[in-house]
Every structure is written in C-alpha cells, then in structure tokens.
Image (tube, rainbow, N blue to C red):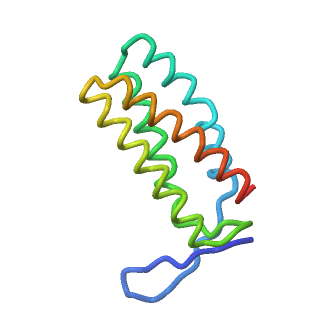
C-alpha cells in the first residue's frame, strides 16, 4: 500500500496509509457532481452550483496528501491542486453570476477527471 509522511506535533515523521475507500468515495462524488453543476448552471442556480463545487474541492483536499498507488506523487499533488484551483474559479464565477466562467470551470473539471484517471487509475 502507498503511504505518506505526515508531520506530527513533535516534528517526528509518521506514515499515514493510503485510504482507498476515501479516494473511491471522492472519485465517485467527482463523477456525479458535474452533472448536478451543469443542471444548476442551466437553471442559473449559482448557489447550488457553488455548493457542489465546494464539495468537489473539499473532497480533493482530503486526499491530496496521499501517495498515489500508481503514478508519481508530484504529479498527483499537481493534478489535485489544479483541480481545486479550477473548482475555486467556478465558485468565483458563481459569485459573479458568470455562466460562461462556470461552464468553463465545469469543462475543466471534467477534463481533469479524465486526465487523473488516465494517470492514476
């Protein structure tokens, strides 16, 4: 199993195990939510879209420190940071009621999901 260093309070290094169940839960959520976000965007429900984007970003944040079971850890970190940044741009677009910006963020998230699956699945 992959593991990851986590800094403890006493600055000693400890290892946290890769949590496959959590990663699968986050990935399933990320596969489902773009459809909900697209529907919210179509209905100009910017609050609903922003809430779903926050859910996606939070899920990725929870798994960002894991060492991937496949692929390079630095690419994992980069992919997750780009995903979170794209979700945050979508949230900003919701705040501005910018439907084009929101649609661009949705497309970016779907593309990043595909890229991640090719690289880490």
In what quadrant of the picture does the C terminus appear?
A: bottom right
Residue 53 lies in quadrant: top left
Q: Is residue 99 left or right of residue 80?
A: left
Residue drawn at 63 percent across, 35 percent down: 31
Residue 104 lies in quadrant: top left
Residue drawn at 38 percent across, 26 percent down: 100
Q: Nearer the viewer, residue 48 or 74?
A: 74
Count of marks overlaid on the render: 0
70 lies above or below 29:
below
65 lies above or below 45:
below
Whole-percent x, y for residue 73 in the image: 61, 72
121 lies above or below 30:
below
Whole-percent x, y for residue 98 in the image: 31, 25
Q: Is residue 104 left or right of residue 118?
A: left
Residue drawn at 52 percent across, 61 percent down: 64
Residue drawn at 45 percent across, 89 percent down: 12
Whole-percent x, y for residue 65 in the image: 52, 66
In what quadrant of the picture does the N terminus appear?
A: bottom right
Residue 105 lies in quadrant: top left
Q: Nearer the viewer, residue 84 or 62?
A: 84
Q: Is residue 107 left or right of residue 1?
A: left
Residue sticking out furthest to the top: 43
């Amino acid at each position: 199993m992959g593991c990851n260093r986590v800094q403890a309070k006493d600055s000693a290094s400890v290892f946290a195990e890769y949590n496959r169940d959590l990663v699968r839960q986050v990935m399933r959520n990320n596969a489902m939510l773009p459809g909900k976000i697209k529907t919210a965007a179509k209905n100009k429900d910017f609050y609903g879209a922003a809430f779903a984007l926050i859910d996606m970003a939070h899920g990725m944040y929870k798994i960002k420190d894991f060492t991937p079971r496949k692929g390079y850890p630095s690419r994992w970190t980069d992919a997750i940071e780009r995903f979170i940044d794209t979700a945050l741009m979508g949230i900003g677009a919701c705040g501005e009621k910018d439907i084009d910006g929101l649609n661009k963020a949705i497309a970016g998230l779907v593309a990043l999901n595909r890229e991640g699956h090719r690289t880490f699945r």
